[in-house]
Image: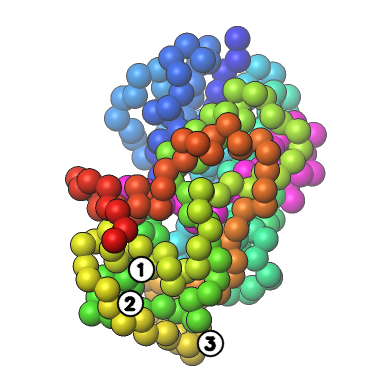
């Protein structure tokens, strides 16, 4: 019987994934977290991080599947993105190789295929991490979710701020095509890949049931907040991004929003079609279910 080792088990996607694993699926489940965690049935927590394999390498062997969720996100410095997303992935991959781990599933991001951008270190570090995984001798599969929404999504609060004011504020022309997916659906997709042992060396992109423009997504989010229709105001992407680049320089990379994060407003974030996900599609959550405020019913469009 196989065991499972999970990095980023306390993160936004990782904790949803752990909660979905059927009882008895694995002989042992070990989850890595930088902070102490509350007890979870069937999960052994190890406190540590990817920088040092000493606390966790003992849990890897030739019967272990590895689900790698851990990542630095948000407006942290380029050095942190590289240290966690690229260097941390390399430490994990080398440990997996030494242990001859059975398989590695790496949760990357649709941003990994955005154009090269020196001011978007998250995307750069995810590309580097993917290259490290592809160069490994461990059987692997890479998953690239699109924009991940759902209760507690880090990006959802920012989108609500843009959508819920006196006007709907859109960065750029609002025509970028997006395909949001709910966090629970990402967790279910990872569960399915592991269940089918789909370590085929492929890169599978994962998006939700609907493709729409960024402007229309903001309109749907506004409706979910119970607000009336409002005028749309477009902020030019170039000046907005330039201002954030200056702010990051002045604040030493501690700006609450990074210039790179604006990329999602102008780059298409559609998943490439993949027949593997067809079994999941009838169960995928709708846009309204993804963006509804916690504790409310599902909003419907009028």
- Numbered circle sitting on residue 46: none
Image side of residue 59 versus residue 246, left or right: right
x and y, in percent, of residue 48 in the image? 46, 37
Quadrant containing the N terminus in the rendered view: top right
Mark 3 = which residue?
Answer: 238
Q: Is residue 65 above or below residue 158?
A: above
x and y, in percent, of residue 113 in the image? 67, 61
Q: Tell me which corner region of the image, top left, top right, bottom left or bottom right, holds residue 146.
A: bottom right
Name which residue lies at 40% across and 60% down.
155
Cα distance in 3D space between marks 3 and 1 = 23 Å
Look at the image and name its color scheme.
rainbow
Q: Tell me which corner region of the image, top left, top right, bottom left or bottom right, holds residue 302.
A: bottom left
Q: Tell me whether the residue at label 1 lies in contact with that at label 2, contact meaning CB atoms closer than 8 angstroms.
A: yes
Question: Sequence-wise, which precedes: disc 3 or disc 1?
Answer: 1
x and y, in percent, of residue 170 in the image? 41, 78
| Of the pair 161 and 94, the residue shown nearer to us | 161
Mark 2 = which residue?
Answer: 168
- Numbered circle sitting on residue 219: 1
Q: Is residue 88 above or below residue 5?
A: below
x and y, in percent, of residue 172 in the image? 49, 81
Segment colored magenta: 131-152
**Mark closer to the observer (2, 3):** 2
Query: Would residue 102 be counted in the magenta stretch?
Result: no
């Amino acid at each position: 019987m196989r065991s499972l080792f999970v990095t980023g088990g306390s993160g936004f996607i990782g904790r949803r994934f752990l909660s979905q694993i059927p009882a008895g699926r694995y002989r042992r489940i070990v989850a890595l977290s930088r902070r102490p965690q509350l007890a979870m049935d069937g999960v052994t927590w190890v406190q540590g991080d990817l920088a040092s394999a000493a606390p966790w390498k003992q849990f890897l062997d030739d019967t272990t599947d590895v689900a790698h969720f851990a990542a630095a996100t948000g407006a942290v410095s380029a050095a942190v993105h590289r240290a966690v997303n690229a260097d941390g992935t390399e430490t994990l991959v080398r440990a997996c190789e030494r242990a001859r781990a059975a398989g590695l599933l790496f949760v990357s991001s649709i941003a990994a295929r955005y154009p090269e951008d020196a001011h978007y270190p998250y995307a750069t570090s995810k590309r580097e991490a993917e290259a490290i995984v592809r160069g490994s001798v461990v059987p692997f599969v890479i998953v690239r979710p699109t924009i991940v929404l759902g209760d507690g999504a880090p990006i959802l609060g920012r989108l609500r701020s843009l959508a819920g004011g006196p006007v709907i504020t859109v960065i750029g022309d609002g025509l970028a095509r997006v395909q949001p997916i709910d966090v629970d659906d990402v967790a279910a997709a990872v569960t399915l890949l592991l269940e089918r042992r789909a370590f085929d060396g492929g890169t599978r992109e994962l998006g939700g049931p609907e493709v729409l423009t960024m402007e229309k997504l903001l309109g749907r989010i506004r409706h979910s907040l119970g607000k009336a229709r409002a005028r749309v105001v477009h902020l030019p992407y170039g000046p907005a991004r330039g201002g954030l680049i200056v702010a990051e320089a002045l604040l030493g990379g501690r700006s609450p929003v990074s210039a790179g994060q604006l990329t999602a407003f102008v780059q298409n974030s559609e998943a490439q079609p993949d027949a593997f996900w067809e079994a999941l599609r009838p169960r995928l959550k709708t846009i309204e279910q993804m963006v509804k405020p916690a504790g409310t019913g599902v909003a419907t469009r009028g």
